[in-house]
Amino acid sequence: MQLSRRSFFKFMGAAGASAAARPSTALAWESKAPPDPYGCLVDLTRCVGCRKCEEACAGVNKLPPPERPDCQCTIFEKKRRPDAKAYTVVNRYFTGKIDGFHNPSPTFAKVQCMHCQDPACVSACIVGALTKDETGAVRYDVNKCIGCRYCMVACPFEIPAYEYFDPITPRVMKCTFCYERISKEGGLPGCAAICPTEALTFGKRKTLLKVAKKRLKENPGRYINHIYGETEVGGTSWIYLSEVPFDKVNLPVLPDKPSPKLSETIQHSLFSYLWSPLALFGVLGIFMYGSNKSAEKKKETAKEKGGPDA
């Protein structure tokens, strides 16, 4: 089988046309979010900074008790983040609000894993240790985790923490959404169950969005006209209402596009089209092998006949 220069370029052109003709829909990204997961509505206008949610979370998840749980005088002087020993924390922010006595009025904001509809951490995990289940919780399987910590880099909210102090069996630590209480016991997350001011409302996400929109409509002067988490990074299971801009309480300004949409589209494109050149070079290898065999056969035939080498 002789592969001439002209045949080679014809073959290359046909292969390229075939790859270009591949339907783009084959690479289209699709959301993997459950249709109507559970969620939690956080109304920052109702939060008084009691930190009962921190205490309940620690008890449910067998974590160390929160620092100074019975005294709020100094704990709010520093800004805290969820870490390996605390899945949720409440911070205090002064954003320019003034109370009836003309004193600065604080806003308290609880922060935890947002349990995104299409979580970047799940997309980034190369071993499937993180998954999004039907309840809406982003679950963690320590038996699959290899400690790469890609999830920590991928999370737009900078939530997953790592047990650096445990050199033997370190884990990635974050809010579990109390999925066992939800799925097996039909209960509420620990934080939502204990909140004394009903700043936390647990339920189905679509219902919570209706509740949030109703509050915005009925109290336009009380809230800024935005539900944080409705569309940010494709939507989150935890959604917020506030009377101050969300970036003032350390909730980042984020695009609506889910984080995995870009990364997974690039990955799928690379892997999909990577097989095209591999297959192409495989076929070319067969052609070249056949061409070499044909040339060798001609040489042997010519020698047997006593003629010149071909």
Image (cartoon, helix red, strand yellow):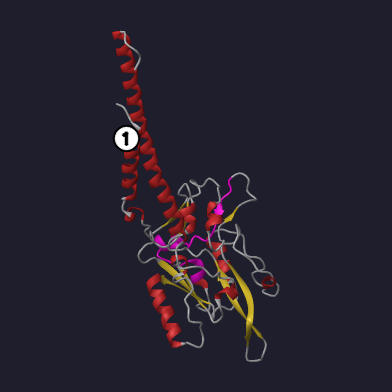
Q: Position of residue 15 (x, y in %)?
A: 33, 42
Q: Residue at x 45, y 83 (%)?
A: 216
Q: Residue at x 67, y 74 (%)?
A: 72
Residue designated by label 1? 7
Q: Residue at x 43, y 61 (%)?
A: 118
Tell me: 265 left or right of 254. Answer: left
Q: Quadrant of residue 160?
A: bottom right
Q: Is residue 47 above or below residue 288?
A: below
The quarter of the image holding the N terminus is top left
Q: Position of residue 276 (x, y in %)?
A: 37, 42
Residue in the foreground of this view, choosing between 298 and 32:
298
Q: Is residue 151 magenta?
A: no
Q: Is residue 310 above or below residue 90?
A: above
| Amino acid on which the number 1 mark rests in the picture | Ser
Residue in the foreground of this view, choosing between 287 and 56:
287
The quarter of the image holding the C terminus is top left
Residue in the foreground of this view, choosing between 299 and 34:
299
Tell me: 136 left or right of 253. Answer: left
Q: Is residue 190 above or below residue 126?
A: below
Tell me: 147 left or right of 73. Answer: left
Disc 1: CA contacts within 10 A as few (<14), some (14-19) or many (>=20): few
Q: Position of residue 270 (x, y in %)?
A: 43, 48
Q: Quadrant of residue 81?
A: bottom right
Q: Which residues are magenta?
A: 169-192
Q: Residue at x 42, y 80 (%)?
A: 213
Q: Is residue 180 magenta?
A: yes
